[in-house]
Image (spheres, helix red, strand yellow):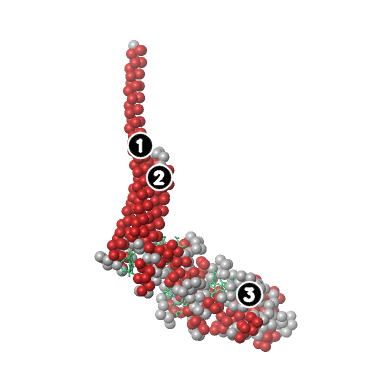
């Protein structure tokens, strides 16, 4: 009760009386109607509210017990009984929040229900501009639908991971709708070509982010983050921790540059390669570090160290494979080689400390493994050629013996 009174004081509407949809006169009558009047009742069958036993009056008010068997439409859609008709756009968020921000009410349906959507929404650019009367920003129904609202976990819900980008793009990729604002409309296009979209859409990797994972479902940023620019560390924590201790941390903060997006972009994130590192024309490092500076020297060192390890591992791999094909037993060193490759992968992560000695340590471990694999490969090939020589000698001796034997047989025959 108190919660409801408090809610009315802060401007909310208390939840409406509950009636089963099948018994609801609203549903029964509207199913007989046509067009825009039928559509809500038809869609409602799949709606999460319908499934929870709520009916049209949950949002529109009115009296769902009369109007079909007794009385007429005017008795059901009765303003005196709280009927509000079609809610104006600027009142929709508060309407949804009248239940969704009411802890006591929501917990009777789901003990784990979250009730912070509206509060979070009010902190976002969408919510702030909505409250100020901007009709173009997103409100609850733009992302969830109006009638036929689905559970967010349903794969065909507009906020399901694989559908979110298209839901946001309906506005953010529409130049007409976004005309009044000074922001780009290319986020969807850029995101769609990113390594993240590829992982999510093609490989069905639900761990890869889409728009709301970085921008939050309802808020300005996901919970626990001051800024969207910090979101990368939630998933790429190792690179984040390394960056945090690196000389770039302070330098980027002073230049007001984001940690990861400065080198990787935010929407247009692509698979990385060694080409990003070093002092070649296309490397990211030379956009800031000029020849002769410490950063330039270190960038070149890091690149050549990584390429060097890669070459050594490749040489060892070729040797071991030749030996293996010739039938030598090299499974041990081949296994060690994969550990060497792990060091190479690790080195590309450790790059993010921008600390030459730390990288060198990993590279040295890798080089040691590469050297011992190469040694095993050399040994196996040496042994192979030794065995081959031995074989040739034994074959020669055997041939001589056979010849002698033939001569002996012929003599005996005579
Ligand atoms: C006996 C039939 C009947 C019943 C019962 C009925 N409606 Fe309607 N409803 C109509 C008709 C006809 C219209 C279109 C004419 C009008 O707006 O009055 C309509 C229109 C509406 C509209 C659109 C109003 C607008 O301004 O565009 C809403 C919303 C609505 N009904 C909700 C409800 C709800 C909620 C209930 C149950 C409490 C309900 N209806 C019960 C027949 C019915
Ligand atoms: C979860 C809240 C909610 C429920 C439940 C709900 N509606 Fe609505 N309805 C809305 C909102 C919000 C709008 C206004 C949409 C807009 O203006 O874009 C609306 C609009 C309408 C309209 C006007 C549609 C138009 O295109 O002009 C009708 C008619 C209507 N609802 C009927 C119903 C009926 C019948 C039911 C039950 C079968 C129902 N609604 C259940 C939220 C709800
Ligand atoms: C910009 C799009 C957007 C807007 C606006 C929006 N939502 Fe959501 N909503 C989402 C996304 C995305 C999710 C999360 C889906 C998931 O978890 O996979 C979500 C989840 C939810 C959930 C499920 C529980 C939860 O918190 O995860 C509820 C309930 C909900 N929203 C209600 C609302 C209400 C009420 C409003 C208006 C105050 C609103 N939403 C506005 C996109 C939006
Ligand atoms: C009369 C109260 C009430 C109103 C008004 C209401 N809802 Fe709901 N809504 C619920 C209940 C109850 C559930 C089921 C919650 C659960 O089981 O976790 C629900 C579920 C949802 C879900 C699914 C959440 C999930 O976890 O999958 C979404 C999305 C949602 N509502 C959006 C809206 C939007 C958008 C509006 C406004 C147009 C709205 N609701 C208005 C009571 C309401
Ligand atoms: C109904 C249209 C609509 C939908 C749907 C929508 N947005 Fe928006 N969004 C807007 C408008 C309009 C603005 C205001 C732009 C401004 O003020 O710069 C905005 C602002 C934003 C901003 C702030 C931009 C800035 O100014 O820095 C972000 C971030 C954002 N939206 C992300 C999203 C995400 C993520 C989704 C999907 C989950 C989404 N939006 C869905 C219309 C929409
Ligand atoms: C990997 C994380 C990530 C994903 C995924 C992502 N964004 Fe962003 N987005 C960002 C970051 C970081 C910024 C810059 C924020 C800042 O500077 O505060 C940004 C900025 C924006 C802006 C502000 C205008 C601009 O272009 O700079 C909008 C609008 C926006 N994103 C919408 C979207 C939409 C729509 C999607 C999905 C199609 C999306 N974002 C996907 C991280 C992401
Ligand atoms: C929700 C988790 C999540 C967030 C947030 C996230 N990523 Fe990712 N990221 C992934 C996953 C998962 C992959 C792996 C895709 C694959 O390899 O198929 C990935 C891949 C990458 C790659 C490609 C790695 C490679 O192997 O070349 C880069 C670069 C990247 N992310 C950078 C970022 C940046 C920068 C941000 C912040 C703007 C960010 N990510 C935010 C989950 C996330
Ligand atoms: C100063 C530029 C720079 C910054 C800042 C930066 N990266 Fe990188 N990142 C690189 C380079 C260069 C590579 C490629 C290394 C290679 O393959 O030799 C890379 C590779 C990656 C990869 C793929 C290799 C791996 O580590 O698994 C991921 C993922 C990644 N970065 C994420 C991030 C994240 C998250 C941040 C923010 C904490 C970040 N990066 C900040 C330059 C940068
Ligand atoms: C956006 C600009 C920017 C990019 C891109 C960038 N750096 Fe830096 N870096 C800086 C700034 C600013 C400093 C602070 C010290 C300075 O001015 O050299 C710094 C410092 C360093 C330092 C420490 C130098 C010292 O004096 O101890 C190293 C090492 C370094 N960067 C390596 C790299 C490498 C490797 C790359 C490419 C993967 C790279 N940086 C890309 C801006 C950048």
Q: Sequence-wise, which precedes: disc 1 or disc 3? A: 3
Pointer 2 residue Cβ closer than 8 Å to ligand 8: no
Visible in this render: residue 34? Answer: no
Residue at which label 2 appears: 333
Residue wearing tag 1: 383
Secondary element under disc 1, as helix, strand or loop, is helix
Which label's residue is closer to the chain start, 1 or 2?
2
Residue 375 seen from this side: yes
Residue beneath label 3, please? 106
Of the 4 image quadrants, the one containing the C terminus is: top left
Instruction: Return the disc, 2 or 3, that comes first in the chain's sequence.
Output: 3
Q: Where is residue 20 in the image (x, y as percent from the top left)?
A: 69, 75
Residue at figure coordinates x 49%, y 72% from the top left: 224
For the N terminus, the quadrant is bottom right
From the Cβ of disc 3, is ligand 4 less than 8 Å away?
A: yes
Q: Which of marks 2 and 3 is in front?
A: 2
Q: Which residue: 40% across, 69% down?
A: 259
Find residue 354 and report its horizontal and vertical position in percent. 35, 63
Mark number displayed over residue 43: none
Q: Residues within 10 Å of mark 1 (few under 14, many from 20)?
A: some
């Amino acid at each position: 009760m108190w919660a409801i009174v408090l809610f009315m004081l802060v401007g909310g509407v208390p939840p409406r009386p509950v009636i089963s949809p099948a018994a609801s006169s609203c549903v029964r009558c509207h199913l007989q109607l046509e067009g825009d009047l039928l559509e809500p009742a038809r869609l409602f069958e799949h709606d999460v509210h319908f499934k929870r036993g709520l009916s049209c009056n949950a949002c529109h008010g009115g009296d769902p017990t009369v109007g079909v068997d007794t009385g007429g439409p005017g008795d059901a859609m009765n303003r005196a009984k709280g009927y509000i008709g079609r809610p104006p756009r600027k009142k929709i968020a508060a309407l949804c929040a009248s239940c969704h921000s009411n802890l006591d009410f929501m917990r009777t349906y789901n003990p784990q229900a979250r009730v912070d959507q509206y509060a979070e929404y009010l902190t976002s650019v969408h919510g702030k501009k909505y409250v100020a009367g901007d009709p173009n920003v997103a409100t609850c129904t733009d992302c969830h639908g109006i009638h036929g609202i689905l559970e967010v976990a349903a794969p065909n819900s507009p906020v399901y991971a694989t559908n979110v980008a298209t839901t946001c793009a309906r506005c953010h990729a529409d130049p007409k709708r976004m005309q009044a604002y000074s922001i780009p409309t290319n986020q969807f296009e850029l995101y769609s070509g990113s390594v993240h979209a590829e992982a999510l859409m093609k490989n069905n990797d639900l761990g890869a982010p889409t728009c709301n994972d970085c921008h939050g479902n309802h808020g300005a940023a996901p919970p626990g983050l001051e800024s969207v620019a910090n979101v990368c560390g939630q998933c790429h924590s190792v690179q984040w921790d390394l960056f945090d201790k690196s000389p770039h941390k302070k330098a980027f903060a002073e230049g007001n540059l984001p940690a990861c997006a400065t080198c990787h972009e935010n929407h247009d994130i692509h698979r990385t390669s060694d080409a990003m590192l070093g002092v070649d024309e296309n490397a990211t490092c030379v956009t800031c570090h000029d020849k002769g500076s410490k950063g330039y020297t270190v960038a070149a060192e890091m690149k050549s160290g990584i390429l060097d390890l890669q070459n050594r591992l490749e040489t060892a791999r070729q040797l071991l494979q030749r030996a293996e094909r010739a039938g030598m037993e090299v499974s041990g060193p081949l296994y060690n080689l994969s550990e060497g490759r792990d060091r190479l992968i690790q080195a590309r992560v450790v790059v993010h400390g921008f600390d030459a000695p730390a990288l060198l340590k990993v590279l040295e471990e890798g080089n040691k493994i590469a050297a011992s694999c190469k040694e095993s490969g050399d040994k196996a090939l040496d042994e192979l050629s030794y065995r081959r020589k031995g074989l040739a000698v034994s074959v020669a001796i055997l041939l001589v013996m056979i010849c002698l034997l033939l001569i002996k047989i012929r003599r005996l025959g005579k």
